[in-house]
Image (tube, helix red, strand yellow):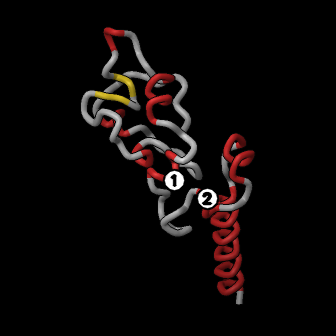
């Protein structure tokens, strides 16, 4: 009987963790989106949002301008870089419900001081 209670408690705890994680979104997105997950999750709730969903609110040219580097480091711009230009999928670096390291950090060691996961 105690094994059954332990299994039920563990299962219940996991379900609470999953449901709590699903509703945690950043304050600036809460203000715009509210609780309508489908606003971003245009491919279904269990799928990553498409880039088109992100680009409904975020303009890639504005992002590239905001994250521009000095002329010397200009290709270290995460939104306009040497490898991908402006075509890198948003989900490669950003995750609303968790943390994610930028794709660039797999090979490069430069810092993005204002990086929002």
Tell which residue pokes out farthest to the bottom in this image: 1
Residue 111's mark? Answer: none
Kind of element beneath mark 2: helix
Query: Which residue is disc 1 drawn over?
Result: 53
Quarter where residue 75 is shown: top left
Horizontally, residue 2 falls left or right of residue 63, namely: right
* Residue 66 position within the rendered picture, expressed as x and y whole percent measured from the top left: 51, 23
Looking at the image, is 81 positioned above or below residue 102? Answer: above
- Near-viewer residue (101 or 14): 101
- Residue at screen point 52% across, 30% down: 115
Circle 2 residue: 39
Q: Residue at x 46, y 52 (%)?
A: 52
Q: CA distance from mark 2 to mark 1?
A: 7 Å
Q: Is 55 in front, or is 45?
A: 55
Q: Position of residue 3 (x, y in %)?
A: 65, 84
- Which of these two is toward me, 4 or 27? 27
Q: Circle 2: is it few (<14), some (14-19), or many (20+) Cα within 10 Å?
A: some
Mark before the other along the chain sequence, 2 or 1: 2
Q: Position of residue 10 (x, y in %)?
A: 65, 73
* Residue 86 falls left or right of residue 28: left
Q: Residue at x 66, y 72 (%)?
A: 15
Name the residue rendered at 32%, 37% in the picture: 106
The quarter of the picture where the N terminus appears is bottom right
| Quadrant of residue 35 within the rendered picture | bottom right
Measured from the top left, where is residue 34 in percent x and y? Answer: 73, 54
Residue 107 located left or right of residue 102: left
User: In the figure, is residue 77 to the left or right of 11?
Assistant: left
């Amino acid at each position: 009987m105690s094994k059954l209670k332990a299994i039920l408690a563990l299962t219940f705890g996991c379900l609470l963790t999953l449901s709590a994680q699903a509703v945690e979104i950043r304050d600036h997105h809460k203000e715009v989106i509210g609780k309508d997950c489908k606003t971003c999750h245009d491919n279904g709730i269990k799928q990553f949002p498409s880039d088109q969903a992100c680009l409904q609110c975020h303009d890639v040219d504005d992002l590239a301008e905001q994250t521009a580097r000095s002329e010397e480091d200009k290709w270290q711009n995460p939104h306009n870089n040497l490898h991908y230009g402006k075509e890198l999928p948003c989900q490669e670096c950003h995750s609303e419900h968790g943390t994610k390291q930028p794709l660039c950090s797999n090979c490069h060691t430069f810092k993005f001081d204002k990086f929002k996961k």
